[in-house]
Amino acid sequence: YNECMAQMFFLMTFAGTECALLAVMAYDRYAAICEPLRYTQLMSKWVRVPLATASWVWGVIDSAIHTALVTDLAFCGDVKIHHIFCDVPPILKIACSDTYINEMALHTASIFVGLCPFLLVVISYVFILSSILEIRSNSGRRKTFSTCAAHLVTVIIFYGMINLNYNRPSAGYSLEVDTLVSTLYCIITPMLNPLIYSLRNKEVKGALQKILGTQEKEDAPPGKQ
């Protein structure tokens, strides 16, 4: 039981923190594209550190509330969580006591922890899109938009899946669907985060192209090498 609570606490912490970090990354995109001359000022050390710290505090507070509410639930008989890891929805599914407060807490958190950062992302991209449309050359537009593509894909996957997971009625719980949803927002999106920045680096791009080129030569038939 204690291990499950600890696992749920860290899972909720990372999920809440990811919501805030995606909003911070959208702001970084806004500063780079819309305010390039002031970028170093808008994203200085004195801005980045507080934003990162606030993101983690945001996630910890959200997780602590949900974990505390779950500890007040009663469980009957042989408790077995039908999921790949401990999370709030599957725990509420096996609880014997009333889970109304827990469900309302999830819906409320989805507004403050999920919707508010998402709106900040949307606002940032409204300004970004406006700046992109002002670029006259098509190549310039494509190059500028390409810097946002990976982040946009991550935002869509993460916010879409986490909203589906925590705002779904408990009666509609399905192990197969929940496993897929949880995998997308717990595993796939964190893996995409390094790519959002690293693939913009010329040295990383060069190394990746070199690795892919070497692999293609190794896989090619002997006569074509």
Image: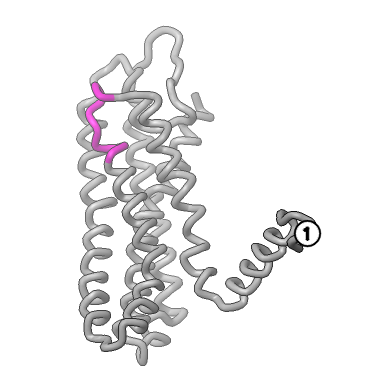
The image shows residue 47 at horizontal and vertical percentages of 40, 77
The image shows residue 108 at horizontal and vertical percentages of 21, 43
In the image, 200 versus 112, the foreground residue is 200
Image position of 92 (left or right of 207): left
Instruction: Give the answer, above or below, for where 199 lies relative to 12.
Output: below
Q: Residue furthest bottom?
A: 37
Q: Residue furthest right?
A: 222
Q: Which residue is mark 1?
A: 223
User: What are the residue bounds of the magenta stretch?
Assistant: 164-172
Quadrant of the rendered image containing residue 83: top left
The image shows residue 28 at horizontal and vertical percentages of 37, 74
In the image, 104 versus 210, the foreground residue is 210
Instruction: Give the answer, above or below, for where 17 lies relative to 42.
Output: above
Quadrant of the rendered image containing residue 116: bottom left
In the image, 175 versus 79, the foreground residue is 175
- Residue 181 belongs to the span the image colors magenta: no
Color scheme of the displayed model: one colour
Instruction: Give the answer, above or below, for where 47 lies relative to 96.
Output: below
Dot 1 crowding, Cα within 10 Å, few <14, some 14–19, many 20+: few
Q: Amino acid at mark 1?
A: Gly
